[in-house]
Image (cartoon, rainbow, N blue to C red):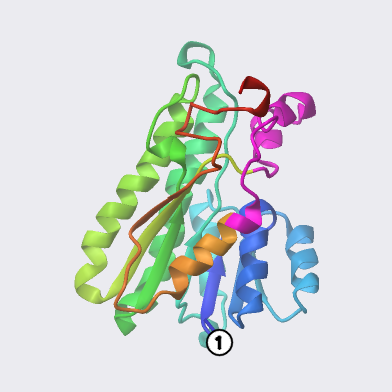
Amino acid sequence: MKNKIVLITGATSGIGWATAQEFKKVGAKLILCGRRKEKLELLDNKLGGKQKLLNFDVRDKNEVFKSFDSLPENWKDIDLLINNAGNAHGLDPVQSASLEDWDSMIDGNVKGLMYVTKAVLPSMIKRKKGHIINLGSIAGKEVYPNGSVYCSSKAAVDFFTRGLRIDLNPLGIRVGAIHPGLVETEFSDVRFKGDKKRASAVYEGMEALTAKEVASSILYMANVPEKVTIADMIILPTRQANSYINNRKNSL
């Protein structure tokens, strides 16, 4: 990955932050994207201050394309796109869930990912070369109670990835997805709107994955020979069997 141009969305925290650190270690040239400008700048400083920073919200279609147009010419030939940005809001049955939460999840997890992909593709198509790795979730493989819309959004990522791989296969562009299980990040803080007690309960007794462990798996996917495509990877904590079966320490 040395000197490869790697673009990471959602780089301001969690898996995105850890992924930036892992790819920096192997000499990649990073384009870091996120909504929180101060967090982007903090990460850039931690990585030596030589990254390109794009401050935008993936849900804003116009800002996505405007941001990519602003890149210097020598940064536009992106070798690897890591579509990491996403969110979960609420954990409620359909009949009582918030429409605003639904919009945030569908707009960020699905439409935002599609916008960024569309913005990056022209250069890859022109060169007939490139790699796209989308961040899905075990929730996109199996539905869990009260997660119907979040799970639907991640299932959409799964099927979009499959279709994208078919569309781009004749052009030599690789497409894959990684689907983590339980990862201890600020994910649950956001989902439960700052309710720390409820958020921490998600991880109790689980020995959840770390963001670095997922980032290392993304790096592995990216590092295989160009003739190889890892199309689909599921990574779970050992205590997790699927999206809803979790064997917590105190339950054994």
Q: Residue at x 31, y 76 (%)?
A: 125
Q: Splitting the image into 4 quarters, where does residue 188 fall? A: top right
- Image coordinates of residue 246 in percent, x first then y, are 54, 28
- Image coordinates of residue 152 in percent, x first then y, are 40, 33
Q: Residue at x 21, y 60 (%)?
A: 166
Q: Residue furthest top?
A: 95
- Image coordinates of residue 117 in percent, x first then y, are 41, 61
Q: Is residue 10 visible?
A: no
Q: What are the residue bounds of the magenta stretch? A: 184-213
Q: Nearer the viewer, residue 120 or 219?
A: 219
Q: Residue at x 44, y 25 (%)?
A: 148
Q: Nearer the viewer, residue 212 or 92?
A: 212
Question: Please, what is the three-letter code of the amino acid marked with disc 1?
Answer: Asn
Q: Which residue is mark 1?
A: 3
Q: Is 119 rendered above or below residue 110?
A: below
Q: Is residue 235 left or right of residue 230?
A: right
Q: Is residue 239 left or right of residue 162?
A: right
- Image coordinates of residue 50 in percent, x first then y, are 71, 81
Q: Residue at x 47, y 77 (%)?
A: 78
Quarter containing the C terminus: top right
Mark 1 Cα shell of 10 Å, populated few (<14), some (14-19), many (≥20): few
Q: Nearer the viewer, residue 174 or 164?
A: 174
Q: Splitting the image into 4 quarters, where does residue 167 fall? A: bottom left
Q: Is 238 rendered above or below residue 218?
A: above
In the rendered image, residue 196 lying in the magenta stretch gets the answer yes
User: Element at badge 1?
Assistant: loop
In the rendered image, residue 126 lying in the magenta stretch gets the answer no
